[in-house]
Amino acid sequence: MRSVSIVATGKTRFGAFPELNIRDLAREAGQKCLESAKVDPRQVEALYVGNFAGPSFVGQNHLAPYIGSALGLEGVPCTRFEAACASSGSAFFHAFGAVAGGIYDAVLVLGVEQMTPQTTARTTDILAAAGDLASEVRAGATFPALFAMIAQRHMYEFGTTREHLAAVAVKNHANGLKNPYAHLRKAITIEQALNGRMIAEPLTLYDCSLISDGAAAVLLVASDRAKEFAPNPVCVRGVAQASDRLALHEKPDITTFAAVRTAAEKAYRMAGVGPGDIDFAELHDCFTIAEIIALEDLGFVPRGQGGPASADGLTALDGKKPINTSGGLKSKGHPVGATGVAQICEVVEQLRGECGERQLQSAGIGLAQNLGGSGASCVVSIFGA
Amino acid sequence: MTAYRNRESGEIILTAPQSAAGEFETVTLSGQGTVYSCTMLHAAATPFEKSLPFQIAIIQLEEGPRLTARIQGEKVKIGDKVKQIEESNGVQVFALSA
């Protein structure tokens, strides 16, 4: 297997852009990515698109060639990947395999989602369809409700508190304030988070990520050709995808995600590193409890300690293990199909020292964790020199 | 409530088995269980908005399997004993045991 590097990133601002065409968002991210590496579209040998529900949100299907043609790609394979909120993480994983396996030298991976043309209620319906329709969804479960049940059980087993959850939201909003591409750039307090409108007990509005529009792209290149594209390529040290059952009630333990643990173990082994070697990470905080559990599943803290560690500042920008320097899904926003690649953009830009006000001092090895549904898909990737 | 028991392993499953998974017999469940986790919803998908607020739970059935159910009546918490009271549009409805 060949070494693979990222030579360029490109992204739109995340926000509410209901008036745009989904292709405009994708084109902006893709063009910025190609232009930053001065790449002619004809050098791109394939396009891997991550998108969860374009057909439901905006009615457009057959998205990958639609986007590819807008970017000037002619005749090359353009394919869409769907794995709920891990759609573009999955596109990245499969693109990596194609470059590592020698099929292509240069591949564009692009995640995009446009959600705000729909009402919040309709968006909730579309997102819920990533759960088990015949059982969970039929009983009335929404994604906030599923993660609320995860939070309740985590609180019951480990003593996690609502203050621990709120600490995650406060920290991610503080980080997002320093990210010009973030959707909701607004500082919040613990009191605000605790007193927010209740969505599904114990989760308030402040425990939930945002409904956003946006796109993000990275250019993957065989490492032996990376210097032709950029002076500062970032190596993909490890990447793995894992799956699990959709329905929460079919998982033996809902306070941990088996797919995250499996993907992490494989990615760590491939990279030849362990949790202690990771300097910083972008974690999938679709809900505050998800970031707490990810800290545990990735081995950053012992099981049950994700809440106290978050409240104690371990994960703050100036903490020992900065998490979600971008602001995370909570503040940067969560256009679901764009999220996986957007996380990778942040890790790569931190490693290159391009993050401005939120730039970390020591960023040697970074990790991205992209979760789909209530844990039925997960992609973990590790980047470094 | 009915379920399917694997004649060899004794495992009980709630959804219709695949023929390749072995031989199954139909069994009747007691309808008794314990709340494994639960939440009260204050926002819902469109078809359920008029029922708000309502509670759903993951129930650990006495016989082993878990399912996602609607809770009727009094609010439940983890560890509470519950019993099945009806099936409505393919959804099991549970309530606190007396």
Image (cartoon, helix red, strand yellow):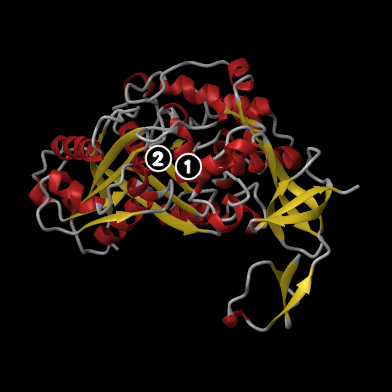
- Whether pointer 1 and pointer 2 mark residues with C-beta atoms closer than 8 Å, the reply is yes
Question: Is B5 situated above or below A298?
Answer: below
The mark total stands at: 2
- Mark 1 falls within which chain? A
Q: Helix, strand, or loop for circle 1?
A: helix
Residue A12 visible: yes
Question: Dot 2, how many residues are within 10 Å of its Cα: few (below 14), some (14-19), or many (20+)?
Answer: many
The image position of residue A234, as x and y in percent, is 28, 42
| Residue type marked 1 | Asp
**Residue at the location (52% across, 16% down)?**
A188
Q: Residue at x 64, y 68 (%)?
A: B15
Residue tagged 2:
A365
Tell me residue A104's x, y (percent): 19, 59
Q: Quick check: A270 left or right of A149?
A: left
Residue annotated with mark 1: A277
- Across and down, in percent, residue A2 comes to 27, 60
Image quadrant where one finds the N terminus of chain B = bottom right
Q: Mark 1 to mark 2: distance in Å?
A: 7 Å
